[in-house]
Amino acid sequence: MAIATLTQPFTQSGIGLHSGLETQVKVLPAQPGSGRYFVRVDLPNRPTIPAQIAAVKSTILSTELAVGQASVRTVEHLLASLISLGITDARIEIDGPEIPLLDGSSAPWVEGILDHQPDGRQFPVSEKNLTEPIWITDKDAFVAAIPAPQLRFTYGIEFDLAAIGQQWHTWQPDREPFSTTIAPARTFGLAHQIEHLRAQGLIKGGSLDNALVCGPEGWLNPPLRFANEPARHKLLDLVGDLSLVGVPPVAHYLAFKASHHLHVQLAKKIAQLI
């Protein structure tokens, strides 16, 4: 497995999806073998939060990591970008509790990484292969990791809204670039759920500028970047959550109607096996 970090730091700023707070993130080179980790530069002593499965605090509509009282939320889009572009080590400084949503996709993160990335880096190939299948189910939703000769991700979703319906997408990192086939896919929400979620203190920073919203009559803010953009975005989330094991072992990762909670349960199981 090739170890890589950035050649130079880059910065992004924006509003957090759930907190509604503006934060600045600086992604910097890190020492080989240090992994990907967050630093809350706004807190006393600048606490460090590793991007590891043991640090997961919450999986309610995003993935939140914490060490002690220090936490960072909605880490999945940035982490998916780093792992998919071969960045195994990165110091991520943030001056608030949530990674900014930007345009709702990973594309802005990818742009920054590609500008400061060692040439030719792609998804790192683990030295470990999965030797037995893993299945985690919740009613008709599931996530699985199946032994396979190449790394592959497949995601399916199903919604009653006609504009979404049932969608699937498969991505094989060694055949298609993350930057053009997965990264541009934006987060999405359902119009009828917005008031309920906001009443729970969630999606305070969500808007038609940073998330696709679907209602009974269709998408409120078209056009879509892909016909199956929602399925691609869910796949993006899965990649980011699985990166919490470091470099996922070679396998076919399969999910249907899953969630951050199920993604993380799968990652925990994988971490136990490797």
Image (cartoon, helix red, strand yellow):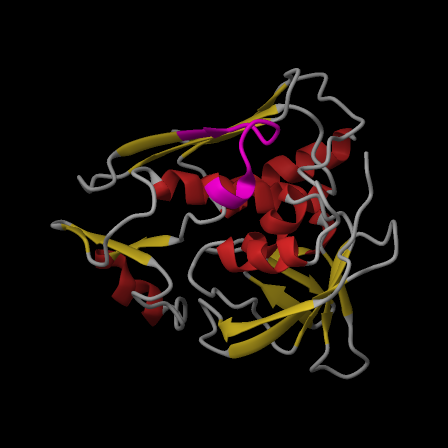
Q: On screen, 160 above or below 117? A: above
Q: Is residue 5 left or right of residue 215?
A: right
Towards the viewer: 166 or 232: 232
Instruction: Give the image location of residue 179, x and y in percent.
Output: 53, 45
Q: Quadrant of residue 109?
A: bottom right
Asked if one can make out residue 94 in the rendered structure from this viewpoint, the answer is yes
The residue stretch that appears in magenta:
169-180
Q: Is residue 203 left or right of residue 111?
A: left
Q: On screen, 133 above or below 205? A: above
Residue plotted at (78% across, 77% down): 46
Residue 173 shown in magenta: yes
Residue plotted at (79% across, 61% down): 29
Residue plotted at (46% across, 55% down): 105
Instruction: Give the image location of residue 234, x and y in percent.
Output: 44, 42
Instruction: Give the image location of residue 58, x and y in percent.
Output: 57, 57
Instruction: Give the image location of residue 131, x and y in percent.
Output: 72, 17
Residue plotted at (75% across, 59% down): 37
Towards the viewer: 98 or 55: 98
Q: On screen, 258 above or below 251? A: below
Residue 58 shown in magenta: no
Q: On screen, 161 above or below 138? A: below
Q: Is residue 35 left or right of residue 202?
A: right
